Image (cartoon, rainbow, N blue to C red):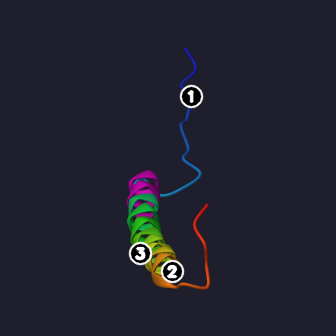
Amino acid sequence: MESKKLQFTSSPGGFRDSIRAYRKYKKDWHARMEVKLAKIEEEIQQAKNNSYFEMV
């Protein structure tokens, strides 16, 4: 019987490292979006308080 040789194309920890990197990216993205949404919310509040803008 012929034995088959198994060869990996990347390091054994590569998959776990990619998952960790994705989770870090996702966490950073959420942090950036929180800042962006807070800024937009602040602009909305300023527009509401400004008499120049009329809410319809």
| Point 44% across, 76% down: residue | 45
Q: Is residue 21 above or below residue 16?
A: below
**Is 26 or 30 nearer to us in this picture?**
30
Magenta-highlighted stretch: main secondary structure? helix
Q: Residue furthest top?
A: 1
Q: Where residue 16 sits: x, y (%)?
A: 38, 54
Task: Find disc 2 in the rendering and name its residue.
Answer: 43
Q: Residues within 10 Å of mark 2 (few under 14, many from 20)?
A: few
Give, as a three-letter code, the residue at label 3. Answer: Ala
Residue range (magenta):
13-21
Q: Where residue 52 sits: x, y (%)?
A: 61, 85
Residue mark closest to the camera, 3 vs 1: 3
**Is 19 or 29 nearer to us in this picture?**
29
Give, as a three-letter code, the residue at label 1. Answer: Lys
Determine which of the numbered discs, if any, sits on residue 38 in the image.
Answer: 3
If you read the primary sequence from the N terminus, does the residue marked by circle 2 or circle 3 appear first?
3
